[in-house]
Image (cartoon, coloured by chain):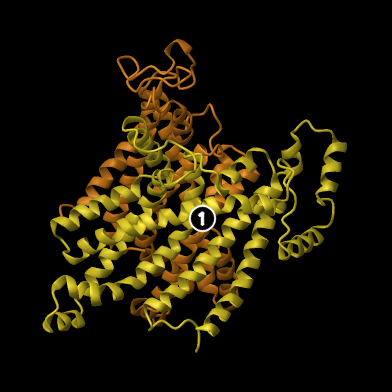
Amino acid sequence: MTSLLLRRLAALIPVALGVATLTFAMIHLVPGDPVVAMLGENAQPADIAGMRHELGLDRPLWRQYLTFLARLASGDLGESISMHEPVARVITQRYPATLELAGAGLVVAILVAFPLGIVAGANPGGAADLGAMGFAILGISVPHICLGPLLMIVFSLILGWLPLTGRGGLYHLILPAVTLGTAIAAIVARMLRQSLAQVIAADYMRTARGKGLSRMGAIVRHGLRNALTPVITLLGLEAGALLTGSIVTEMIFAWPGLGRLLISAIGNRDYPLVEGCVLTFSLSYVVINMITDFVYSAADPRIRIGPQ
Amino acid sequence: MIRRNPSLLAGAGIVALILIVALVGPLAVRADPLAIDLSRSLAPPGPGHWLGCDSLGRDMLARMVWGARLSVAVSISVVSFSLIAGSLIGGTAALAGGRVDGLVMRAVDIVLAFPGFLLAIALAAILGPGLVDLVLALTAMGWTGYARLVRGQVLSLREREYVQAARALGAGERRLLWRHLLPGLAGPLLVQATFGIGGIIVAEAALSFLGLGARPPAPSWGNMLEAGRQFLLVAPHLTTVPGAAIGLSVLGFNLLGDGLAQAVGHRD
């Protein structure tokens, strides 16, 4: 397992490098001058040249790229133009809020998806299956920007049960987490149902029933574990949706995380901060995908990642 | 076949409704979506203004149907561009094989290492708000899926017996591609494109909601939802109406995609 971990960590480096390069390329190669964008169309040429020099944008691109990588390796993401603070420090302050929201969204997704998927997959074609899958297709179709305000109207404004916006205790977390987790719950429930419905027909399930296990007992003890591999793959893939969904969710609920920071940085044309936020989001995605690979091999020992 | 495929029927019905609203709606609804009349600010739905008015007194029905046109136009353009670019890139990689294939697929992997919507946000932020830039940003997010699908399908299809047989009979590469590979690709691509349109409708609305898409005052369901958020308590119709439209469109395209997948026997 340790060698596996080391191999996966080593494989992380080129991907992280690729992601960092793509972020750099986007900011520096895409048409549109960030300095003109920051200072406005009517800025004086002298001011533009000054700002360009200050940010090091007047140097050859390859030198800018090497400096960018060297600073990145030491955790230096530059200085935020709008907040006059190191980007790394601002991001460190905001990141826990985003992790909290994404984690809570994942918990909601799993808590909703597993019972639905198991009930539907255990009785394919039954009433419970139809109901659960009906919910799933609705859940997939209602995007965050619709579900969030709807939940706010019902649970905060009409019923007054939960706070409208902001970050605080558990109560503040419920509506954003449900907003973020519902679509993923729906997708995962569908996959679990499909996967379980296939597993139930397998010979070893009949053997387990033949040896006296109840139907539910056989599903939970033998079926679920075998049905889990595609579900874990999907959860890993949906990590991207969880991270990017948190950007929209944070805006809806005024949640003080990285997503809201990114959007306000875009509004302030604070490119070093935009670059830092995009990098943090994308590197988080890469790391989550690596963790998914691990959970795989724990859930299904048949999977061997790379030669042993 | 259709009777046994209720998803296809329901999805096609909803999608047809949305396309009709987008095409005919702006002609049928005479009100100007941009005309401001503060005396009607936040007016509730009623005769004359069937979906009420927004905070500037603009007719919501007019804004909704123009928003539908924008949403449909953007999503169909993005999916068409993504499909063409992705198919060309994926198809070239599969047919060329070897080093070209390896290089192209590594590039696809790097783009995929980025969460798609984040890529669109970053590009939209750099390109600035506006429709052309919006389409570009969303296409950058969408093409990789088609590239992977086409590459995988071409690699698998060309090993099929009927393709081998055509080759044995002396069919050239071009004939193989047009007569034998492309028809096999059409089904899976159609399914993926249908789901893709639903996904792009959401992404467009989300980008406009974040202020990175359609530039106000142009009506987009996303920026209407954003503007209505400040009036949740006094005028909930400002958020629920565009919200329902987005949800319904996505539901329609998802059902249609499910139905088509069932019909052509493919689910990616």
Q: Quadrant of the N terminus of chain B?
A: bottom left
- The image quadrant that residue A299 belongs to is bottom left
Q: Is residue A70 above or below residue A158?
A: below
Identify residue for label 1. A99
Q: Position of residue A178 (x, y in %)?
A: 37, 48
Is A190 placed left or right of B231 in the picture?
Answer: left
User: Most extreme residue toward the bottom, as rendered?
Assistant: A308
Q: Position of residue A36 (x, y in %)?
A: 76, 39
Name the residue at 38% across, 83% down. Answer: A301
Q: Which chain is in yellow here?
A: A
User: Most extreme residue toward the front, as rendered?
Assistant: A169
Which sits in the foreground, A277 or B120?
Answer: A277
Q: Position of residue B161 (x, y in %)?
A: 34, 80
Is A58 placed left or right of A303 in the picture?
Answer: right
Amino acid type at mark 1: Leu
Q: Quadrant of the C terminus of chain B?
A: bottom left
Q: Is residue A247 above or below residue B228?
A: below
Q: Position of residue A205 (x, y in %)?
A: 19, 79
Element assignment for label 1:
helix
The picture's colour for chain B is: orange
Name the residue at 84% across, 33% down. Answer: A44
Which sits in the foreground, B220 or B102?
Answer: B220
Classify mark 1: residues with Cα within 10 Å, few (<14), some (14-19) or many (20+): some
Q: Is residue B22 above or below residue A234?
A: above
